[in-house]
């Protein structure tokens, strides 16, 4: 999967403020979960630690035969527990795969079909919800914004640490999905464990810990980088193993490991060039679908290996069964308890797989598949069948010689996916039902969404391998700020794949970051003409017209983007700013309410709301909004300046000085270069008057 996600600089309009964006908070305010009256009581008295390792190939662990990297911590878990030799993911993408792990269901049931635009269905039980009702303390610590609570994976967790602001000055490559290093995740977990041990040492916990580090771009810290200079992916794996070791070591030293069930697995693998794919998301080959899975803990035999195929969806029912709890009526996976304890074969040998990413991101055909211990069928415009006993690397398509086997497996595919004639429009779900109702009332969500059909139309992804290569090389250039080098590659690829949305998206980012806004406008309009435009295209056009001062045209495009994706809150905030400048206060308020309906702690929205109240001559209400902005993000500079102006107008010199100093302390020298001298002058004048 191509992971480049350009950090959009907000469009700044001169009112009384410059605009910044805010990341989400990391902890909920709900009380600690207690056993509900009549709730199921666990039959086994133990903690549960679920560790998911993003983008980790099974063959990059020593216990799975790796010669590239040593992974002593994970190997140690395998030695004291059970290793599953053929664990298979359901989707080669982070968010939908984790939804399957946490619910024991396929994407058709849990509803998270792809990256972004989908929220977990509320009626599907999660393992966190089940254990929370049984009296466990529940907490999750995730390493990437792709698992932000917005997607619903926080359901059942009292603590959900998804804040992506790094607490140390760790250097990361530019232009990638927001993440924190594994050491930050580990520290957050250990802080939580130490606090709960002090407050409720006798209570069992369920903790989910997610390490994102092996995901592209590969940027391991030293000494792992210097130990693996020619294979940075291996360096990331070694670093992640060290973090797992720190966590397991803490549990062992505290006497908790002996009564903690540890489940560790990956969400998907990484192609690393296999089959022409460099990362993951496009294909369903074992490079990205075969994952490590290890279970260790009280009563689990040591050193056992289960050779048969198992699935990500089997994790949730297995944890529940080991505790003597029900996995819920929606679970499609099976418990692996008998395989763990007695070495029996798993109860199901069929594994459904899918990826809609080729369709949603590239405009190519989506892929579905069915895997057994012996066979893999990939349903594509040009279907593929592989026999593992003769071809473990999936190099020879034997579908022509085995039509009966292909037909049997294809029937299994449609049993999960639904009959082929039922395939149609993919309904995105960018927000949950409650927020959808609120946004509908504000005029959003009801129309304008891009239509995507998952009906096997579009080119076969394997016929676009050359384009994948261009995209990956361009991604590398973009992640190192070589914008025009990347643009040149993408411009050459576009005529051969003119309906590929990702090519347009990346060209837009290249032109924006090289400040070639005329070329950016042209590529956005071409994407619309070729029906390859998403909400980001319309939002980008809105920002271009803001820069030109054409605000009425800007809000027209921003409104379209908001209807297509009301969850894109930076677009809503920019649109509110444009409406404020136009004097259309009711429209500005409508946009801000749409933001706050989704994120009540969005500091940028509160700051803009304060400006709106100033425009309405309501200083007390404005002050309240600016204070809420600071409560939401104490590092956002603008509300300090605005509170300083209010205090100055009210004659409160001391308060004004304090707030203006607060602004200068937090101001960005480049972004706020036009404002800083004015604030310094005002501060000097106030000091002179004292």
Image (cartoon, rainbow, N blue to C red):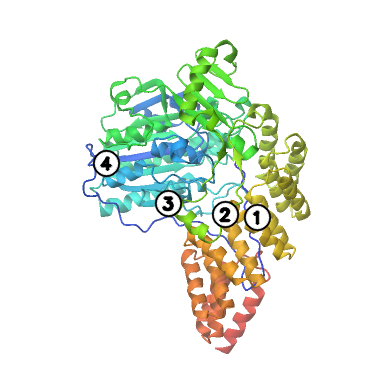
Q: Nearer the viewer, mark 3 or mark 4?
A: 3
Q: Is residue 302 visible?
A: no
Mark 1–mark 2 CB contact (< 8 Å)? yes
Q: Nearer the viewer, residue 281 or 217?
A: 281
Q: Position of residue 200 (x, y in %)?
A: 25, 52
Residue position for label 1: 539
Q: Is residue 284 above or below residue 611?
A: above
Counting from the top left corner in percent of width and height, residue 171 is at 57, 50
In the orientation shown, which residue stands out farthest toward the bottom?
689
The CA span between labels 3 and 4 is 25 Å
Number of other residues with Cα within 10 Å of mark 1, as a class: few under 14, some 14 to 19, many 20 or more: many
Q: Is residue 152 left or right of residue 379?
A: left
Residue 320 percent coordinates (x, y): 30, 36
Quadrant of residue 110 in the image?
top left
- The mark found on residue 568 in the picture is 2
Dot label at residue 255: 4
């Amino acid at each position: 999967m191509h992971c480049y996600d350009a950090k959009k600089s907000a469009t700044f309009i001169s009112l009384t403020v410059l605009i910044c964006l805010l990341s989400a908070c990391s902890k909920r305010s709900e009380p600690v979960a207690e056993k509900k009256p009549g709730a199921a009581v666990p039959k086994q008295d133990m903690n549960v630690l679920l560790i998911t390792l993003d983008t980790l190939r099974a063959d990059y662990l020593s216990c799975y035969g790796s010669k590239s990297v040593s992974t002593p911590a994970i190997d140690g878990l395998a030695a004291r527990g059970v290793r599953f030799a053929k664990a298979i993911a359901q989707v080669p993408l982070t968010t939908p795969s984790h939804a399957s792990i946490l619910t024991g269901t396929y994407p058709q049931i849990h509803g998270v079909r792809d990256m972004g635009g989908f929220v977990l269905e509320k009626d599907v039980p999660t393992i966190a919800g089940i254990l929370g009702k049984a009296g466990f303390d529940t907490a999750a610590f995730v390493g990437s914004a792709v698992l932000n609570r917005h997607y619903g994976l926080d359901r059942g967790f009292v603590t959900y640490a998804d804040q992506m602001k790094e607490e140390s000055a760790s250097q990361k490559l530019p232009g990638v999905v927001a993440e924190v290093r594994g050491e930050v995740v580990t520290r957050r977990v250990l802080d939580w464990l130490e606090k709960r041990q002090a407050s409720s040492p006798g209570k069992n916990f369920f903790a989910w810990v997610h390490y994102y580090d092996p995901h592209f771009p590969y940027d391991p810290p030293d000494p792992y980088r210097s130990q693996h200079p020619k294979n940075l992916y291996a360096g990331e794996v070694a670093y992640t193993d060290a973090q797992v070791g720190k966590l397991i070591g803490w549990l062992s030293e505290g006497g908790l490991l002996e009564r903690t069930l540890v489940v560790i697995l990956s969400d998907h693998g990484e192609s690393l060039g296999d089959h022409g794919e460099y990362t993951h998301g496009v294909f369903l080959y074992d490079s990205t679908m075969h994952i490590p899975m290890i279970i260790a803990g009280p009563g689990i035999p040591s050193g056992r290996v289960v050779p048969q195929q198992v699935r990500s969806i089997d994790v949730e029912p297995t944890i529940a069964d080991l505790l003597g709890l029900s996995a819920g009526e929606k679970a499609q996976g099976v418990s692996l308890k008998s395989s763990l304890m007695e070495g029996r074969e798993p109860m199901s040998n069929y594994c459904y797989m899918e990826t809609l990413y080729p369709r949603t991101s590239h405009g190519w055909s989506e892929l579905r598949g069915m895997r057994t211990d012996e066979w893999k069928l990939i349903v594509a415009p040009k279907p593929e069948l592989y026999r593992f006993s003769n071809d473990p690397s999936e190099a020879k398509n034997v579908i022509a010689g085995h039509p009966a086997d292909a037909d049997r497996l294809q029937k299994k595919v449609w049993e999960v996916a639904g009959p082929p004639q039922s395939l149609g429009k993919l309904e995105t779900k960018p927000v949950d039902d409650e927020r959808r109702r609120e946004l509908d009332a504000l005029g959003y969500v009801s129309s304008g969404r891009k239509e995507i059909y998952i009906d096997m139309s579009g080119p076969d992804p394997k016929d676009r391998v050359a384009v994948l290569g261009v995209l990956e090389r361009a991604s590398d250039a973009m992640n190192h700020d070589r914008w025009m080098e990347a643009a040149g590659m993408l411009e050459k690829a576009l005529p051969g794949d003119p309906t590929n949305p990702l090519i347009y998206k990346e060209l837009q980012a290249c032109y924006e970051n090289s400040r070639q806004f005329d070329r950016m406008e042209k590529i956005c309009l071409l994407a619309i003409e070729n029906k390859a435009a998403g909400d980001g295209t319309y939002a980008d056009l809105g920002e271009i017209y803001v820069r030109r001062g054409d605000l009425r045209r800007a809000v027209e495009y921003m409104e379209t983007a908001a209807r297509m994706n009301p969850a894109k809150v930076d677009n809503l905030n920019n649109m509110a700013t444009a409406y404020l400048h136009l004097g259309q206060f009711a429209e500005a308020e409508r946009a801000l309410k749409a933001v706050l309906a989704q994120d009540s702690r969005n500091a940028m929205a509160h700051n803009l709301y304060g400006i709106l109240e100033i425009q309405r001559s309501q200083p007390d209400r404005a002050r309240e909004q600016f204070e809420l902005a600071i409560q939401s993000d104490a590092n956002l500079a603008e509300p300090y300046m605005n509170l300083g102006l209010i205090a100055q107008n009210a004659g409160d010199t001391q308060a004004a000085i304090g707030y203006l100093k607060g602004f200068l302390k937090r101001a960005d020298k480049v972004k706020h270069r036009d404002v800083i001298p004015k604030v310094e002058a005002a501060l000097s004048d106030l000091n002179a008057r004292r």
